[in-house]
Image (cartoon, rainbow, N blue to C red):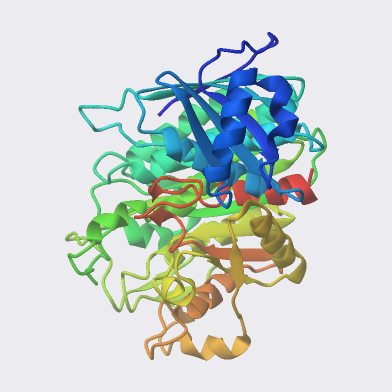
Amino acid sequence: MPIVINYKSSSLKKNSSNLVLFVDEKFNILTLKKHLSKPEFSYIQDLIKTKDLKKKILIFDINSKRKIILISLKKLITSSDLENLGAKFYDLFKENNRNEFILNSDTISNRSENSIGYFLHGMRLKSYKFEKYKSKKSKNYFSVNVIGKKKTSTRDQVKFNSIEEGTFFTRDLVSEPGNVLHPDEYARRLKSLRKFGLKIVIYDEKKLKKLGMNTLLGVGQGSIRGSYLVTIEWNGLKDRSKPLAFVGKGVCFDTGGISLKPAKFMEDMTYDMAGSAVVVGLMKSLALRKAKVNAVGVVGLVENMPGGNAQRPGDIVKSYSGKTVEILNTDAEGRLVLADALTYTEERFNPKFIVDLATLTGAIIVSLGSEYAGLFSNDDKLSKQLIDAGESVEEKVWRMPLNKNFDKLIDSKNADMQNINYVGGAGSTTAAQFLQRFILNKTPWAHLDIAGMAFSKYGGALNSGGATGYGVRLLNKLIEDHYE
């Protein structure tokens, strides 16, 4: 549902419909006396005694066209608290056909001017719906007029908007079905990002063969669609300082290949490209807000199909790094895509760090469910920064172990390594241990396994179910706090 937000300089009319006011957590409404007519104040003062004050939002029906909504704010409130309140506010009214509100920012006392910005940000993030293929689309809408002296600055409006646009772009990509967003179409869509000032370079199969990216190409060779590596550069600094690098797995649909997946829930594998979508959404966000940073996104785009030319279990391929891999299971394909992408990113861009994102293993869902992404890293500083950023925006990560003792589980008798741990156990860790072998120059690196976070069947605090866009806000926060 679209949300239209306007900042008004005009004063509040006493009879304005659907008035939103903020109070302290004890619902002390004396501070609101000057913002309400006498009859309304008396009415609310009497009625509030019958309300459940443990609720964060109280609604008072003045008449058929007018509501007064009180939102409680605790004394020590965080930006995430405000975003969640905005999302909850949206949820309460989203079913109405016509929603027009006046929000009085002057009732937010002793808090930053950005409080309104975070509240509205939460509303917009929660409002996302993917209705592209529905013949009957929702006609509901939200109109919010913000009055009062406390207004989000133009700079912060740009920041919030850029994060929303990046997150929504990520959700759009993840929500697309595999017959629409195959690798050829995905690569074409990335070209459109050039209009935002991003440098886009697309490597097709011919170029990838010349580069020797055989682990990436092997995944896609059973599909009639092409395979691609795409680099997305944002140069927000005039100097030539090392960029921050973000690498994403873009398996547009994953059947498992010859090691075919079970039919049940295979349709969910349209979101096996979510890691790449996060990278793309992040890069769009950085460009929209003109981030003062140099950054590069690298995505490998393939489709894993069981065709006549598909990769077989037992095949041995040589990666871009020169290391050889024995393919024991063609459904452990994401790590093969990332292997070539990681080595190329490190060699080509010499970045300050690399963060890769992938819906890599079902094992991480067994470990962490849908509450945390799995974090694997060779660098304590980068890990702490990611953990702190995740806590701040409630896109949490949990650090998991890496250790040389796990290497024996992926060593191969016939090649330098095998792509799965055939013995079983430690599935997420051995996958990360595999990826670490393709970081050749000790670049600080972190791997985020987002298999449990990229898609939600039941919705979350800031999304209504489906593609979550998890990772865009996390990485934006990482950059904003530590690298700008």
Percent across and percent down for residue 94 are 40, 33
Percent across and percent down for residue 445 are 66, 64
Q: Is residue 281 visible?
A: no
Residue shown at 46%/74% (left/top)?
A: 324
User: Is the residue 111 above or below the residue 482 in the image?
Assistant: above
Percent across and percent down for residue 319 are 48, 66
Relative to 301, is 297 on the left or the right?
right
Look at the image and tell me in which quarter the N terminus lies: top left
Q: Nearer the viewer, residue 252 or 398?
A: 398
Q: Quadrant of residue 390?
A: bottom right
Relative to 253, is 336 on the left or the right?
right
Residue sitting at the far top: 10
Q: Is residue 342 visible?
A: yes
Count the numbered circles shown: 0
Q: Nearer the viewer, residue 150 or 67?
A: 67
Residue shown at 56%/54% (left/top)?
A: 247
Percent across and percent down for residue 256 are 27, 66
Q: Quadrant of residue 163?
A: top right
